[in-house]
Amino acid sequence: MNQQGTVAADGPHRSKIPVTLIGGFLGAGKTTLLNHILSGEHGIRAAVLVNDFGAINIDAKLIVGVEGDTVNLANGCVCCTIRDDLIGACLGLLQRPERPEHLFVEMSGVSDPVPVLNTFLETQLALVFAVNSILLVVDAEQLPRLKGDMAHLARSQLGAADIVVLNKVDLVSPDELNHVKNLVQMVTPGSRIIEVVQGQLPLELVFVGGSDAPPPERREDARKREATAHDEAHSHDHVFGTWNWTSDRALSLPKLRSTLEQLPETVYRCKGVVQIEELPRYRYVLQMVGRRYHLEESGFWGTAMPRSEIVLIGGRAGIDPDKLHSAFDACIGIGDESQSPVLRLTRLLAADMPGD
């Protein structure tokens, strides 16, 4: 940040801070989910911007310090109030000794997520922050009962969601649950729906760390956290599975995009490192949460052997390994310029450049 209080770019290869926007109608369970994030032993230095400290019931044993509108927690997380100044709150986080690795922003229960999203897309915040998903918490019991303006607002919120967290599913019958899922899919057919009880969302589905692998001393902790999250998922009747794919050959960018856009709705997260044939010297980090994905350049391969590695997380019953292998195998580039205008352009530019 410079002295005028504006955001300064962090350099060409430093990853932007991923942002998850958390919305949901009044009483849906946003506060419970936020408290789950703040108190979790996930090993991520997360920041959570909330509208009201008083609504977040943070365990006093976790608090290690309070500085004005900021609460510091023992697990490395911080919780700050927005106070009608989202940009100012975000700039304040960048002034801290250690910048957050992930930012969660609570939206008002009666607000439309789009203006908040645009604040991150159309202001100076876009230099440092990147919205990776809009997560909407829905009360499975409440949604079908909303009427008039309330129902209209709920539909508007749903329309912007990448992931719908269907909360309080233990309070409805199987038929009622199917009904509310159908309502959600009618409003936002491309979103992923995850059923939870008491906001206990497996956090590996929404956390996005930096572009590079964690340092060695944190890898064992990460494995332990994954095992704990797996046990929590089973305790709430959620059975998640992972699928891995690797290739030593460069991928076609148009084909990769097409495959990502056609992944089944039961795939909640996709992440990895890829080499694309259009720009083969560069290493790209792939992040996908819900239906939103992006590729971020993270420097040259250098002396490392280029290798694409992709991991998917989703409902175990919805992961078909054979179909996924076929889909990603089809992404391997074959040098066909007619299928990739970008490939044709980069080859033309390379041909015009003087030799090394």
Image (cartoon, rainbow, N blue to C red):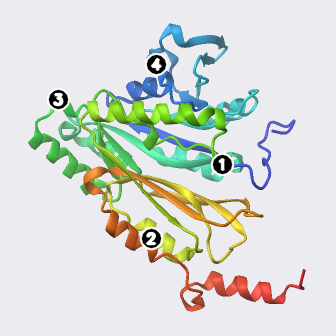
> How far is disc 3 from disc 1 in space, using C-alphas?
41 Å
Residue at mark 2: 328
Marked residue nearer the N-terminal end (2 or 3): 3
Marked residue nearer the N-terminal end (3 or 1): 3
SS label for mark 1: loop
Relative horizontal placement of residue 200, taking residue 38 as reference (left or right): left
Marked residue nearer the N-terminal end (2 or 4): 4
Task: From the image, state whether disc 3 or disc 1 is nearer to you.
Answer: 1
Marked residue nearer the N-terminal end (2 or 1): 1
Query: In the picture shown, does residue 353 fall above or below 317?
Result: below
SS label for mark 3: helix
Tell me the tag on residue 212.
1
Question: Dot 1, how many residues are within 10 Å of its Cα: few (below 14), some (14-19), or many (20+)?
Answer: few
Residue at mark 3: 171
Taking depth in this image into account, of 53 and 19 the one nearest to the observer is 19
The extreme bottom residue here reads 338
Relative horizontal placement of residue 206, taking residue 123 as reference (left or right): left
The percent position of residue 352, horizontal first and vertical second, equals 83, 89
Q: Check disc 2 and give the amino acid type.
A: Phe
The percent position of residue 166, horizontal first and vertical second, equals 29, 39
Q: CB under 8 Å between callouts 2 and 4?
A: no
Residue shown at 71% from the left, 67% from the top? 282
SS label for mark 4: loop
Q: Check disc 4 and give the amino acid type.
A: Ile
Residue at mark 4: 56
The percent position of residue 168, horizontal first and vertical second, equals 24, 31
